[in-house]
Amino acid sequence: MTSPNNSALTTASPAPLPVSFWLALRFWLKLGFFSFGGPAGQIALMHQELVERRRWISDARFLHALNYCMVLPGPEAQQLATYIGWLLHKTRGGIAAGVLFVLPSLGILIGLSWLYIAYGQVSWVAAIFYGIKPAVVAIVLQAAHRIGGRALKNRYLWAIAGGAFLAIFALHIPFPAIVLCAGLLGWLGGRWAPSAFAVGGGHRKSDKSFGPALIDDHTPPPEHAGFNWFRFGLIMLTGALLWALPMGLLLVTQGWQGTLTQMSWFFTKAALLTFGGAYAVLPYVYQGAVGHYGWVSPSQMIDGLALGETTPGPLIMVVAFVAFVGGFSHPVWGANSALSTGVVAALLVTWFTFLPSLIFILAGAPLIESTHGALKFTAPLTAITAAVVGVIVNLALFFAWHLFWPLGFAGEFDALAAAMALAAAVALVVFKRPVAQVIGVCAGLGWLIKCVF
């Protein structure tokens, strides 16, 4: 029920004026520079700005769009920005919102990746990263705790999470196979035990009102939001060409086994497997980038995740760090091309990672918008989310192993790193401290331990 305050606000507040494309463009650019806090923080920021403050879209329409984005593979916050940008200003609005959500983060991460390569072995920089790494272990555990608290509502889903953990930890089954098996179990469960698989992590419809919105609860979909098969096919064809042209050029110039070709293909697959957000796909990235291709080391992967946590933009932008470091260490145009290879690799990987997200929104949003108020989550998604919890726990344990026993179990146990990881986990899970604050404190402790004491 709408509160009295909300009712008064609805009556007293005039409807907002139409938003120009250029005004929206400035907002999306600003959002790209200030979207810290991971998906939850970014979605909360967009809700505060777009629903509560500017009233460009109503609460119910915002949550409806978010529900669709959560069903898709890919970074949900970036997809939500794309959806709302498209709803306001057609295709150019969606592209502008989606690209500007990523572009500042890409530039910042390329710069930080170069600094990491150039100065990462300097004693005080290494000391800071020594402190940050335990925080990363705690952050990944917090992600498992947060997603598990939302997703594991009964013994069936707990069993799927446990099975996924054993599959990747003990049997070394690839992440895509785990996703497919979990989806199949969810589909079967939805048919035979629907009540057990009807608890997926969606966002319920809200009765809150912050005053009349430009796109309100009962505002008819704009003309460009109507679904038609010709437009759908045209967008899908355009997306296929935008993927095939650079991939074809790489095949001609680098060959199938070329570093840049393999990176582009690998991260295309990763883009289609990010159900459950960035933390869900990190184990797959780890398996490929560290275990199979050797583009980065386990320690570098942890450092990259730390940089991703402390920069704006979607967390999955850690792929730009992986690509830069991998390209830098595997130059394709001679020994002097390390920097250029790293930059090109980061740009290519970002393109192939985020292109599917844009296509999914631009092609599918008209269908979803024409049925707003009727979107429901599927049982396969519920099962996949449960499996993701087990996979993330495995990732945290893998990071912890390389951090606490850097020379293997036969080597010395790093008690200081373990103590910092425990303290960081308590700060995040029990005291609900912000991620950036925890990373900052741990970085300072690392510097004190290595450079002062």
Image: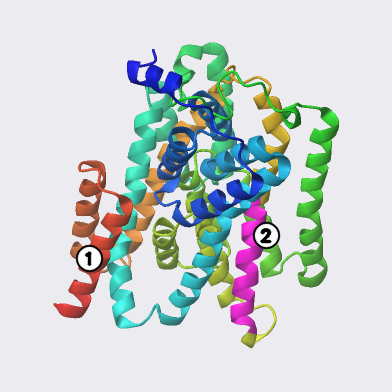
Mark 1 highlights which residue?
414
Q: Is residue 172 above or below residue 43?
A: below
Secondary structure of the residue carrying numbered label 2 = helix
Q: Which mark is residue 309?
A: none
Q: Is residue 96 left or right of residue 51?
A: right
**What type is the residue that disc 1 sits on?**
Asp
Q: Is residue 349 magenta?
A: yes
Decide which of 101, 142 is in the foreground and name it.
101
Q: Nearer the viewer, residue 285 or 68?
A: 68
Q: Which region is colored magenta? A: 337-354
**Is residue 190 part of the magenta span, yes or no?**
no
Viewer-nearest residue: 61 or 160:
61
Q: Residue under label 2, please give it.
A: 264
Question: Relative to 146, is 378 above or below?
Answer: above
Task: Work out whether residue 22 can be spotted.
Answer: yes
Q: Quadrant of the N terminus?
A: top left
Q: Nearer the viewer, residue 94 or 449?
A: 94
Residue 75, given in percent of the width and then of the height, sits at 54, 44
Q: Position of residue 402 (x, y in %)?
A: 35, 62
Label 1: which secondary element: loop
Decide if residue 29 is on the left or right side of residue 147: right
Q: Residue at x 56, y 39 (%)?
A: 80
Instruction: Tell me the distance, in whole angstroms, between the alpha carbons under discs 2 and 1.
Output: 37 Å
| Three-letter code for the amino acid on which mark 2 is drawn | Ser
Spot occupied by residue 235 in the image (x, y as percentages of width and height): 79, 41
Residue at left offset 62%, top offset 55%: 267
> Residue 283, relative to residue 302: is it above or below?
above
Q: Earlier in the sequence, mark 2 or mark 1?
A: 2
> In which quadrant of the rendered image does the C terminus lie?
bottom left
